[in-house]
Amino acid sequence: MKLKNRVAIVTGASRGVGRSVALALAREGCDIALAAKTVEPHPKLPGTLGSVAQEVEALGRKALSIQTDVRFVDQIEAMVEKTVEAFGRVDILINNAGAAWWYNMEETPEKKFDLVMNVNCKGPFFAAQAVLPHMKKNRWGHIVNMSPPIQPEMAGGKIAYMISKFGMTLLTHGLAKEAAGSNIAVNSLWPVTLIESLATINLGLGTPENWRKADILADATVAIVTKEPRSRSGQALFDEDVLREEGIKNFDHYACVPGSTPMVIPW
């Protein structure tokens, strides 16, 4: 158990990638603070913090459910305070909570623009700010932002979304330099292919034959945070590249439909 006695905060942890990452970290011995908006069962949204907490505890680890809307700084600060109160520390932050709006400029109202900026950019910024003092105290920490390498040609047709996601990656590059002397790593992680999620489904991005399971991002996250922080920081990484470094060359078992070919994102 490479993360025994470590504590992680995972945002957007009630379903999808966040749930998979939380369970993968728990399997490595990590206690988990689960943060998301969904506490009560929702008729259109599968999973709650409580259901994921039960899965973490079934793996023999401690779980703390914290209802958190990452658009609001006071809730982010409370999330970190409650984690430290419960576990005494915080070692890993996974900025996974996200909002998707894949539409062009003329179809983007102010409300949607503000949503993606606040969830994808502002939330990770202040979550990182809140955990930094605790990581510096222990001189060990990993922050993983679920965001892509900055490639401007990808912005067409989804400008607001990509501004918010590229801002998240700029957080990775900038904070990695600021935290370089504290043994705190800051990296971004992004999938090569489409991942099964509510965002993929709601945006109509293909069918299960085109998707991979969220487990591939979870396994890549574990590969990142089980390394000594000073060994890699300030990088925007793809899931396949991270796993290849671990000796994994065949990704067929991550396909949602066995034998299918997942759709590659043209980064």
Image: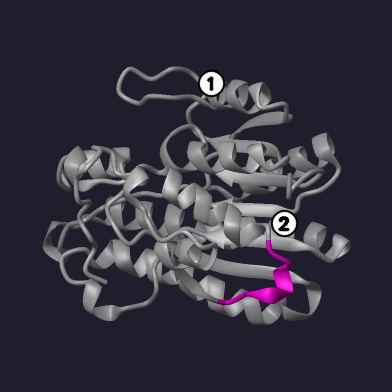
Amino acid type for the residue under numbered disc 1: Ser
Q: Which residue shows up at 31% across the image and 78% down it? A: 151
**Element type at mark 1:** helix
Which is in the foreground here, disc 2 or disc 1? Answer: 1
* Residue 37 is at least partly visible in this image: yes
Magenta residues, dominant SS class:
loop
The count of marks equals: 2
User: Of residues 67 and 179, which is closer to you in this image?
Assistant: 179
Q: Identify the disc placed on residue 225.
A: none
Horizontally, residue 28 falls left or right of residue 156, namely right
Amino acid type for the residue under numbered disc 2: Val
Q: Which residue shows up at 76% across the image and 43% down it? A: 81
Q: Which residue shows up at 77% across the image and 47% down it? A: 6
Location of residue 204 in the rendering, given as x and y in whole percent from the top left corner: 15, 43
User: Of residues 229 and 80, which is closer to you in this image?
Assistant: 229
What is the CA distance from the residue labelled 2 to the residue labelled 1? 25 Å
User: Of residues 250 and 196, which is closer to you in this image?
Assistant: 250
Does the magenta portion include 208? Answer: no
The part of the chain drawn in magenta is: 227-234
| Quarter the N terminus occupies | top right
Location of residue 15 in the rendering, given as x and y in whole percent from the top left corner: 44, 33
Q: Quick one: label 2 or label 1, which is nearer the N terminus? A: 1
In this figure, which residue is indicated by the disc labeled 1? 51
Horizontally, residue 181 falls left or right of residue 164, namely right
Q: Which residue shows up at 54% across the image and 71% down it? A: 171
Residue 155, above or below 57: below
Q: Quadrant of residue 265?
A: bottom left
In this figure, which residue is indicated by the disc labeled 2? 131
Q: Quadrant of residue 45?
A: top left
Horizontally, residue 208 falls left or right of residue 148, namely left
Horizontally, residue 70 falls left or right of residue 87, namely left
User: Of residues 184 and 84, which is closer to you in this image?
Assistant: 184
